[in-house]
Image (spheres, rainbow, N blue to C red):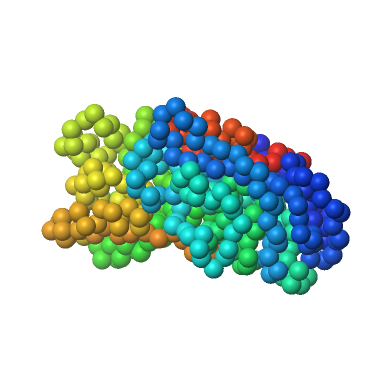
Amino acid sequence: MPVELAPLATPAHKAAPAPYNGSPSSSSSSSNSSIEPKMNKLCRQLSIESPSVGGRECVFSFDVPVPDVPARGARIRVVCAGACYHPKRSGSLTSLNSVSSGSSLATDVSVEGDFPSMLPHHGMRDAALFPGYEVAGVVESLGSELTEDCGVKLGDRVIMYPYEGIPNGYVEYLVVHDLKYLIKVPDNMPLSVAAMLPAGALLAMNTVHAAHELVQSLLEERGDNSVCKILIVGTGGLALWALRIAAYQYSNMKDRVTITIASLKDDGLMMAQEFQRWYFDYSVNVVQWSEDLYEKQLIERTMDACGGQVDVVIDFGTTSRSLHRSMQCLGKGGVVFVIKEVADRLLPKFSRRAEERQQKIQPVEPGNLEQLRELVQLVGSGEIEPPPHTVYPAEDALDVVQKLCHSEIQGRAILRFYPAD
């Protein structure tokens, strides 16, 4: 587990220190709202493009203006940002399959929503592929129209729910226009862990919740002593979160719900063993999906590991081949849960086949604000143990992207903009 970043101490009712590379500006007046006059300061922003073109740099650093504080919002000093990317934009995704197996996917957003952003470089050089939805930081300033009882104070450690129009997170300072999208994180939770929650972990939680409705229905329908079988495809960040959340969800039903991991890489067994150390009373099966084997062999291997056909498949890194394989391993009435953007692309091709097999391909949306609050509580209390992650200085972003593309990072990669104070 990475060393915890110490809480950033901020005196009450004062703005936090200016960015390290900001240009000089006149001294600002201090008030309960902690708003500075028109700022003439700069902060660092990273723009990460698709690393699909060999030999080209894919990470760019810019100096951008520190954004003004919204009247009823807040400015956040970003400490950690999860290295995640946009799952749509299919033209560039083909080259990012290796990243998708270990990264966290977030929901689709638009900078033309209700919340304007001051990001002159947003979208340049395909940067929307790496939007930085997973942000953890410290409240640096509060809006002038907020009152003392607004529920947020300076120095609070927070994460941001990925609402429509959320600014790019690979920047030292960003703003939120409505405090309802800020969630405080407990003091015992490292900000590197908190940064994993808003997109990837939340999507995994919503998927497990959706699958749980089916599991309950099947168990009630089949009666006492029946068993429901779940197959989770992959050992990337999303799959690892789903595994942990499912183990928590079914902790009182271990004899009635079995979980099998289909590992796309050689580290599947190691991941399962690490999981077993935390959840020693929950047995998990592992099957290796080696792409050099014939489909028939993989399907037979999977059903052997699962003890027959499964009832639920959770597949975050879905391809046409993996979806076809999952449906072959799925029993009558079973459901494959996939990310909505993937479902939009593959449903036209597979819907008829699913209907013929009396199966269902169910799209999963990103989770809601209340689910994120619950997730923070569960991780903070230790009831759900976060998957492995590694923290890198933001200036090493290029190296991080290259490592992700070669599947050299176990679990999640977190970019750190500020060291511990």
Where does residue 231 sit, x and y in percent of width and height?
31, 47
Residue 280 visible, this angle:
no
- Which residue is found at the position 56% from the left and 49% from the top? 121
Q: In the image, 165: left or right of 257?
A: right
- Which residue is found at the position 49% from the left and 35% from the top? 58
Q: In the image, 110: left or right of 336?
A: right
Q: Quadrant of residue 60?
A: top right
- Which residue is found at the position 35% from the left and 55% from the top? 341
Q: In the image, 386: left or right of 344?
A: right
The front one of 64 and 206 is 64
The front one of 260 and 155 is 155
Where does residue 333 sit, x and y in percent of width and height?
21, 60
Q: Residue furthest left?
A: 356
- Which residue is found at the position 70% from the left and 62% from the top? 69
> Where does the C terminus fall, quadrant-wise?
top right
Where does residue 64 sit, x and y in percent of width and height?
65, 48
Q: In the image, 315: left or right of 151?
A: left
Q: Residue furthest top?
A: 55
Where does residue 125 sit, x and y in percent of width and height?
48, 43
